[in-house]
Amino acid sequence: MAGASGYAGGEALRLLLGHPEVEVGAVTAASSAGARLGDVHPHLLPLADRVLQETTPELLAEHDAVVLALPHGASAALAAQLPADVLVLDCGADHRLADPVAWKTFYGTDHAGTWPYGMPELLTGPSATQGTTAAAPKQRDALVGARRVAVPGCYPTGVSLALAPGFAAGLLEPDDVVVVAASGTSGAGKGLKPNLLGSEVMGSMSPYGVGGVHRHTPEVEQNLSGAAGEPVTVSFTPTLAPMPRGILATCTARVRPGTTADQLRAAWRAAYADEPFVHLLPEGSWPRTADVLGSNAVVLGLALDERVGRVVVVAAEDNLTKGTAGAAVQCLNLAFGLPETLGLPVTGLAP
Ligand SMILES: NC(=O)c1ccc[n+]([C@@H]2O[C@H](COP(=O)([O-])OP(=O)(O)OC[C@H]3O[C@@H](n4cnc5c(N)ncnc54)[C@H](OP(=O)(O)O)[C@@H]3O)[C@@H](O)[C@H]2O)c1
């Protein structure tokens, strides 16, 4: 586990401690190398006496699987030095985007290449029959037996799963998608930042990355364009909410003329009927972040705003669980041929 002292690394360790087929190997870090894990993550009692080691390819290469939970830009060089038969699950962004131009535009560095994208439930193409998602392809097949996985970003997880069924079913217009999403502060990592101090965050909400500049925008567009089979553009505005974990994403798109609420609901229901981690609530029910804390579930609520011709889908997820570490464990299960749900909770911590 590389980046074990960070938030995503800590969540990965929490989940892996409960996984019946996994033994936690080396735990590595950067500035906190040499510290006891118990001093960094007091909640991980069974690992309290482990000592964080320097992150080196030699040490990581001794494992069957390596989770990289490092700042974006740090994982590509490290991963390139790991043997091809070691499963590498990168929680960072380095290998998520297929388009080098989009990478350069939003991240400002050279593109490190593209790995299989770790969102098994994502619809990856339009259905052969307009209005349904029953036969639309999914990302899962690309993950079975994989040895390199780009674990999705936290916002793209909820947003992509919220809207992909409508695009795969051909029910949504591709050029009028608006997403406003609130995230808990752990989404920004554990490093000290003045805008994340308790005194700045408690009792206040604030937007950031406004104006189409947030780095998750091209990832969401990539996912929705794949589902639609045509380019989809997205206006995305993230906000910071006074809570440690959780994302609530309100996603809206204009529906194609004549689309009914029943058609929409049927498309979403068919897309996720067999999915253990994506749950569509009944009509009139709406997700809450508290219900998915610590859980690998994404919960969706859906309505058609008939007056303005827009579908509204609200998604709740835990940014650290399904939003990163849970997705990594889910992909580890698929890569190693284990049951996909092994070691992954679907119950939250509410209230
Ligand atoms: N937080 C989330 O909700 C979330 C969701 C989805 C994806 N992710 C992604 O997951 C990755 C980790 O995020 P995080 O929130 O866990 O960040 P974090 O809390 O800041 O942790 C970063 C970790 O990386 C280590 N590190 C920093 N620079 C390094 C380097 N050059 N080489 C090796 N290790 C280094 C840090 O070690 P020291 O502390 O010892 O310096 C720490 O263990 C990021 O790429 C992030 O985008 C995070």
Image (cartoon, helix red, strand yellow):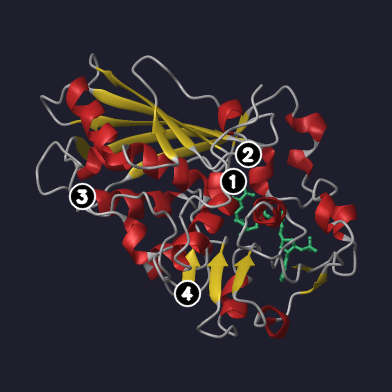
- Please give the name of the residue rendered at 63% of the width and 39% of the height, measured from the top-left corner: 294
- Measure how far apart labels 1 and 2 are at the Cα level: 6 Å
Along the viewing direction, whichever of 52 and 253 lies nearer the viewer: 52
Of the numbered discs 2 and 4, the one sitting upstream in the chain is 4
The image shows residue 52 at horizontal and vertical percentages of 83, 67
Q: Tell me where residue 273 sits by quadrant.
A: top left
Q: Tell me where residue 203 sits by quadrant.
A: top right
Q: Quadrant of ligand 1?
A: bottom right
- Measure how far apart labels 3 and 2 are at the Cα level: 30 Å
Q: Is residue 326 left or right of residue 278?
A: right
Q: Is residue 84 above or below residue 309?
A: below
- Measure how far apart labels 3 and 1 are at the Cα level: 26 Å
Mark sitting on residue 147 = 4
Of the numbered discs 4 and 1, the one sitting upstream in the chain is 4
Mark sitting on residue 274 = none
Is disc 1 in contact with disc 2, using a CB cutoff of under 8 Å?
A: yes
Instruction: List the residue tagged with mark 2.
Output: 294
Is disc 2 in contact with disc 4, using a CB cutoff of under 8 Å?
A: no
Say which element carries label 4. loop
Say which element carries label 3. loop
Q: Within 10 angstroms of label 4, few (less than 14), some, or many (20 or more) residues?
A: many
Instruction: List the residue tagged with mark 1.
Output: 321
**Which quadrant of the figure contains the N terminus?**
bottom right
